[in-house]
Image (tube, rainbow, N blue to C red):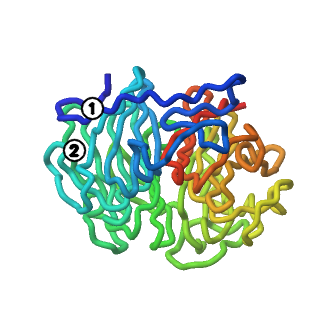
Amino acid sequence: QCTLIGMTVTIWELAFPCSAAEPPRATVVIGGLLEAEGGQWDPESSPLKTPFGVDFDRSGNMFIAELEGGQVHCLLENGRLVRVAGTGGKGYEGDGGPATDATFNGMHNLAVSDSGELFIADTWNHAVRRIDPDTGHIASFAGNGQAAFSGDGGPASGARFNYVMCITLNPRGNHLYVADLRNHRVRAIDLKSTIVRTVVGNGTRGVPVDGTVATESPLIDPRAVAVDSRDRLYVLERNGHALRVVTPDGKIRTVAGTGKAGKADGPALAAELNAPKHLCIDTDDNVIIADENNGLIRKYDPVRKTLSTILGGGRGDPPIRLSHPHGVCVEKNALYIVDTGHNRVLKLPNG
C-alpha cells in the first residue's frame, strides 16, 4: 500500500492496453500507445494532467507531480493510482492539514526520502513543501511563497527562493538540492540541521568559465540538478542548452552542449541540446537528460565524454513518439520517463 497514510484518497483503476505482437522495448506505465505507435491512446483521457515529475519510495511506489493538474498521485504495485496531495485547485493553502486538502502553484517535481518524506518543488509558490509520511499532513519546508533571495546560513524555513524549479536528494539522502532558477543559484539544504547554503552560482546571469569556483560563477538558468555517486553535482540549463558539472573541489565546467539549440549527438562538447528540462543519474553514473524541445531522451557518458540519444527520433524504441518529455528517474535499473505532452509515463530498460 501507499506509504502516505491518514488521508482521504481518490483512486483510478489503470487498465490501458499497450501490448503488441512484439512488445516494444519501452513499456507504458500510465497511459497507452499512440495511434502512430500502434495503439489508440488519447492523451486527453489520461488520469494525469500535464505530469512533470516522478520519484519512488523504498517500497517501489511511484509518485507523480502534475504541473497543471495541481495534484500528486501514487501508483501502487497493483496498478491503482491514488491521489495523495492537492485538490486540483491553484493556490498556496493547506499547511498544517491533510495534503489532500492543499493547493499548489505549478509543481515541477518531487523527491522521496528513505524515511518516506515527500518533498515537492512548489515552483510558482517559491517553496518546497513537505508531506509527513506518518500523518499525511503537509507543511512548507523551505520558502514561504514570496519571491526573494535570503537565508543562506540559516534554517530553510526562513530562507527565500525565486522559482523553485526542481529538487533532488543526493545518494546519501542527507542533502536536498534546489534549482533556484531566478536567483541563478543551486542551493543545498542539510536535512538534519535544515541549514541552507549556496553551492553553485553568484546570483548573476551568464555562462560560467571552465575551472572557476562554482559559488563565484554566473549561471544562465539552472533548471535541474542531480548528484552522482562520486559527489559530482550536475546542473542543467534550459536556455543555456548545456550540462555543467561541479566537481568535489568546488570548480565548475561545461561538459555537454555548445550553448546553441540543436540535436546533434557525438562528442559532448560538440553535441547539442534544445531547451533540456530535467535530468537524473543512472546506476553507472551516466547523466540522463529530458531534452524537451527535441522530444528526446539523451545520455551523457562522463567516461567517454559523449552525448547520445537513447529514446525518441527513431532511437531506443523506433515507434515511440515523445512530446515535451520532462521528468526522468532511474529506479531498479529501469528509466522512467514523464512524457508530459502525452500525459503518460513510460519505462525503458536502463543499460
- From the image, tell me which residue sits under label 2: 99
Q: Is residue 176 visible?
A: no
Q: Residue at x 53, y 54 (%)?
A: 341
Q: Residue at x 33, y 33 (%)?
A: 12
| Mark 1 vs 2: CB contact within 8 A | yes
- From the image, tell me which residue sits under label 1: 4
Q: Residue at x 66, y 36 (%)?
A: 38
Q: Is residue 242 above or below residue 26?
A: below
The image quadrant where one finds the N terminus is: top left
Q: Is residue 343 above or below residue 291?
A: above
Splitting the image into 4 quarters, where does residue 333 fall? top right
Q: Position of residue 173 (x, y in %)?
A: 45, 38
Splitting the image into 4 quarters, where does residue 236 fall? bottom right
Q: Is residue 114 visible?
A: yes
Identify which residue, 294 or 98, lies in the foreground. Answer: 294
Mark 1 or 2, nearer chain start: 1
Left or right of 176? Residue 122 is left
SS type, badge 2: helix
Left or right of 180? Residue 308 is right
Q: Using the image, tell me which numbered label, if any, was put on residue 251.
A: none
